Amino acid sequence: MLNKIILSVLISSLFCTNIVFAKNAKHVTKEKDGQKYYLNRCSSCHGAGSRGGNLYSINEWERIFSKNGIELLELHEGEDDVQDVIEYIKSDSFKLENKNMLNFIQEFAYDSELIPTCY
Ligand code: HEC
């Protein structure tokens, strides 16, 4: 009985280690433009991509970016020091860049196959 418990703990921790490893392994994106836009516009506050992206699912990110980013705008309104982001989301640059940026962020969504999470 005890052996069984120890074994299952061992197996699950092994499993977890593997997943963490996969998560840390460098994922090379095909969405280079989206990555560039994200790094320029978001990463100074939200980190390099793998951290923020898995807050939401692929579909949730889709929704956040839909309708010219109205939800993205609301998520920032009322926060300190985000005037630049707000202007960016309202700008024509966002209209040009948001599709690529969304593709990039979706690669890191929590239900993306590329970055499995361990909890
Ligand atoms: C100047 C800093 C700054 C920049 C640049 C910035 N954000 Fe934010 N963002 C914030 C702050 C502050 C919040 C609200 C606090 C929080 O939830 O972390 C926030 C919240 C969010 C949220 C909601 C997070 C949650 O916890 O639910 C999302 C999604 C988001 N930002 C995406 C983006 C994207 C995409 C970009 C690039 C277009 C971006 N942000 C650029 C500061 C920034």
Image: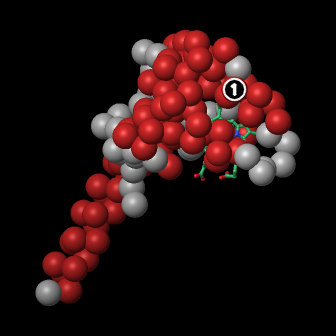
Please tell me which residue lies in front, 16 or 84.
Answer: 84
Q: Residue furthest right?
A: 81
Q: Residue at x 39, y 55 (%)?
A: 118
- Is there any visible trace of residue 92 in the rendered image? yes
* Residue 33 position in % (x across, y down): 55, 12
**SS for callout 1:** helix
Q: Which residue is mark 1?
A: 90
* Residue 48 position in % (x across, y down): 62, 34
Q: Residue at x 49, y 20 (%)?
A: 99
Q: How many marks?
A: 1
* Residue 88 position in % (x across, y down): 72, 25
Q: Residue at x 42, y 43 (%)?
A: 60
Q: Is residue 12 above or below residue 27?
A: below
Q: Is residue 68 left or right of residue 18?
A: right
Q: Residue at x 64, y 47 (%)?
A: 75
Name the image quarter holding residue 97.
top right
Could you tell me the amino acid type at mark 1? Lys
Name the image quarter holding residue 12.
bottom left
Please tell me which residue lies in front, 78 or 53.
Answer: 78
Q: Quadrant of the C terminus?
A: bottom left
Q: Quadrant of the N terminus?
A: bottom left
Name the image quarter holding residue 5.
bottom left
- Is there any visible trace of residue 105 in the rendered image? no
Q: Is residue 100 left or right of residue 107?
A: right
Split into quadrants, the picture shows ligand 1 in the one at top right
Please tell me which residue lies in front, 31 or 18.
Answer: 31
Label 1 CA crowd tier, 10 Å (few <14, some 14–19, many 20+)? some
The colour scheme is secondary structure
* Residue 17 position in % (x across, y down): 38, 53
Queried on whether the Cβ of the residue with tag 1 lies below 8 angstroms from ligand 1, the answer reads no
Q: Is residue 79 above or below residue 88?
A: below
Please tell me which residue lies in front, 88 or 107.
Answer: 88
